[in-house]
Amino acid sequence: MAKKIELTPEQKRFEDIISHAKAYGFVFQSSELYDGLQAVYDYGQNGAQLKNNLKQVWWRAMTQMNEDIVGIDSAIFMHPEIWKASGHVDNFNDPMIDNKDSKKRYRVDHLIEKKIDALKTENKLEEAEKLNATMDAFLAKEDFEGLYNLIVTEKIACEVSNTCNWTEVRQFNLMFSTEMGAVAGEDNKIYLRPETAQGIFVNFLNVQKTSGRKIPFGIAQIGKAFRNEIVARQFIFRMREFEQMEMQYFVRPSTEMDAYNSWKTKRMNFLKALGINPDKLRFHDHTKLAHYANAAVDIEYEFPFGFKELEGIHSRTDFDLSQHQKHSRNKIQYFDEQVEDKDKQRYIPYVVETSIGADRLFLAILCESYTEAKGIDAKGEEKTRIFLKLHPAIAPIKVAVFPLLNKDGLPEKAREVFEMLRYDYETLYENRGAIGKNYTRMDMIGTPYCVTIDHQTLEDNTVTLRERDTTDQIRVLISDLPKIVEERVSLKNILLMVNGKW
RNA sequence: GCGGAAGUAGCUCAGUAGGUAGAGCGACAGCCUUCCAAGCUGUAGGUCGCGGGUUCGAGCCUCGUCUUCCGCUCCA
């Protein structure tokens, strides 16, 4: 552990959350037994459950709650040409160079482009043109030595150190690659997808034809994606292997802004329905748009380390489908009978994308639910009580059942209650330790309900039902338990809220 | 990749002048307990990140290495 110096309250809170995530089986460092693997994490027994619940609610909110959206599950491996069409091969393979004096790293093209701009402002247009052309040629050939020599002969200096003391030009591959087939070699090189969206685009025709959907309609997908991030920090916020939940909504050209605005609202509602404090959510418009987009906004969540992107909503125009049409030499068009103008009936659909990281949502939910409150300990003294204030529907364990004492037939009775509940809810039975310890353990993983069986239970079939957030206990009939639990634990609560019917 | 810091029990840490490791909490078992990590008794758990070097002797000194953390570089 590094020496803790002057942590801000937010940093301290974030460290506490990370420790909590490990101590209670939510998130472990990958390969920890072997000293760890940077920027890769595993989900433990409670984390996997929570993450699955989040994926489940997203999936249902998309596919079950929208009649015009279907879900698919495309492969991680895809034809290598797809990544050329999408622009990832070019954009994810940037040559870089470091200045040895300032230790600053630059993208080679950015560095040279700055010089080109400088030449332009000096009105040396011809020189600028020439330099641009030379650079493009070297970039196209991936001639790193040529690029290096170009930087040196053009006397391009580091802004910080003002020197031309450069390292050699190196390639940073932001996409992971591997070999397909038993024999290794360049020809067999394929990539692990850096985003799931392309799996949707290349299946657009398949799904549209077999589902009989008419535009507008959407395709949703949850899946792993991989990026060789140079810097990957802040716990599971930025990982090399991560999981995306994306939905591509296909619309008629010129109607994309309506869909864009409507999805902005819907997605914000979804996050609020999960119990995230609206004050910690905000829209952040992109001022610099990516080459494929004509509008883009992030929904940001205020993590302990600041407002950061949680979900992106992009209007991607017809860029992707057009690219695939071009590269695959297959027509990707939709025939729209609703359009009156015969010349405009056949078109490449426009796309509005919603894209959220399952891991980021997980982290946001964890940060949001981690609660420190005042409580009373067994001696009646005030203590700090920590619990996860998760929406009951996404909690890893929904209800825990304990015998108050581990004798007098109480365990047997408790097992009966457990058996009654376990078919409908993630239920936990525990007969070890003191009751207070068991309650605390359940608080730590966000279990909304604890049921305790005592001697009175044997007489009148009532139990104490203890509620997580308030620690209040009420006495209820065993036969009423399913109804009471169901009322709060059902995913339906979230889905109704997403649809604005709460 | 560069710079800085750190690696001792599951966790938080101690380890004094180099003399082959301790505490608290947790875990586990038993007892006791009618409701919020209670109490009593007991038990387990560490080749001090790894590898060389110095030394009669290294958790401590030295060199290397790995990993993690913080800052920088990148993020369609």
Image (cartoon, coloured by chain):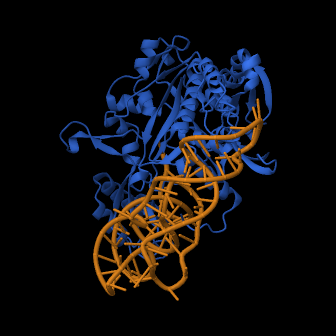
Chain colours: A blue, B orange
Q: Quadrant of residue A361?
A: top right
What's the residue at 66%, 64% (across, down)?
A7
| In the displayed structure image, the side of residue A234 where residue A482 appears, left or right | right
Image quadrant where one finds the C terminus of chain A: top right
Residue A30, image x, y percentages: 44, 48
What's the residue at 79%, 46% (across, down)?
A376
Residue A254, image x, y percentages: 58, 26
Q: Nearer the viewer, residue A502 or A157?
A: A502
Query: Is residue A256 visible to us here?
Result: no
Q: Where A361 sits versus A200, above or below?
A: below
Q: Nearer the viewer, residue B15 or A295?
A: B15
Query: Is residue A433 visible to us here?
Result: yes
Q: Quadrant of residue A192?
A: top left
Q: Where B72 sits versus A391, above or below?
A: below
What's the residue at 47%, 41% (across, down)?
A242
Q: Nearer the viewer, residue A120 or A81?
A: A81
Q: Nearer the viewer, residue A76 or A304?
A: A304
Residue A339, image x, y percentages: 55, 14
| In the displayed structure image, the side of residue B37 where residue A215 appears, left or right | left
Q: How many marks?
A: 0
| In the displayed structure image, the side of residue A319 where residue B37 appears, left or right | right
Residue A368, image x, y percentages: 68, 43
Q: Where B32 sits versus A172, above or below?
A: above
